[in-house]
Amino acid sequence: MERITERYRLAVRALGKFHELASRDTLNEIERDALIQRFEFSFELIWKCAKEHLYVQDGIDAASPKKVIRACRETGLLSEAETEQALKMVDDRNLTTHTYVRQA
């Protein structure tokens, strides 16, 4: 349980940093890249925290972000609307990676 608590703490902190930058009205290119990186980092921490929670609390061993999100819906951690939004975030995260590789 201590590991989940630490992962949760890190995820909340990363999400706060993401929101801090996302709340700005305008971003230069470096800030935009930093915002994308913060999104990716926050997303990774959150889904891995949820994965650990599902395993410890419910014995569910989901291996991918989408499986974790669907399991969160099945266990009542997420509503249907939250599940749809979270699944879109997986696609957005994948899109940022592919877009960045093409631009490099």
Image (cartoon, grey):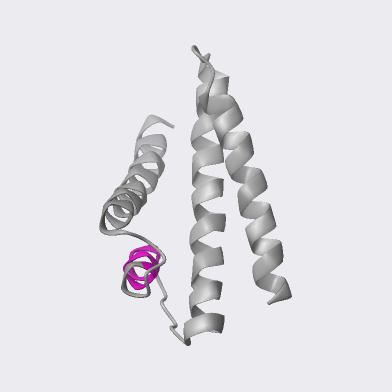
Quarter of the image for the N terminus: give it: bottom right
Q: State left or right for residue 16 relative to residue 91.
A: right
The spot of residue 64 in percent (x, y) is 39, 69
Residue 77 occupies quadrant: bottom left
Q: State left or right for residue 99 relative to residue 41.
A: left
Query: Looking at the image, which is closer to me, 49 or 74?
Result: 74
The spot of residue 29 in percent (x, y) is 51, 18
Q: In the picture shown, does residue 34 fall above or below 6? A: above
SS majority, magenta:
helix
The spot of residue 85 in percent (x, y) is 31, 48
- Residue, x 34% and y 70% (percent of image)? 67
Q: In the picture shown, does residue 24 fall above or below 58? A: above
- Residue, x 27% and y 52% (percent of image)? 81
Span highlighted in magenta in the image: 65-72
- Residue, x 26% and y 58% (percent of image)? 80
Residue 4 occupies quadrant: bottom right
Q: In the picture shown, does residue 46 fall above or below 17? A: below
Q: Is residue 67 in the magenta section?
A: yes
Quarter of the image for the C terminus: give it: top left
User: What is the count of numbered marks?
Assistant: 0
Query: Looking at the image, which is closer to me, 29 or 85?
Result: 85
Q: Is residue 89 in the magenta section?
A: no
The spot of residue 44 in percent (x, y) is 52, 55
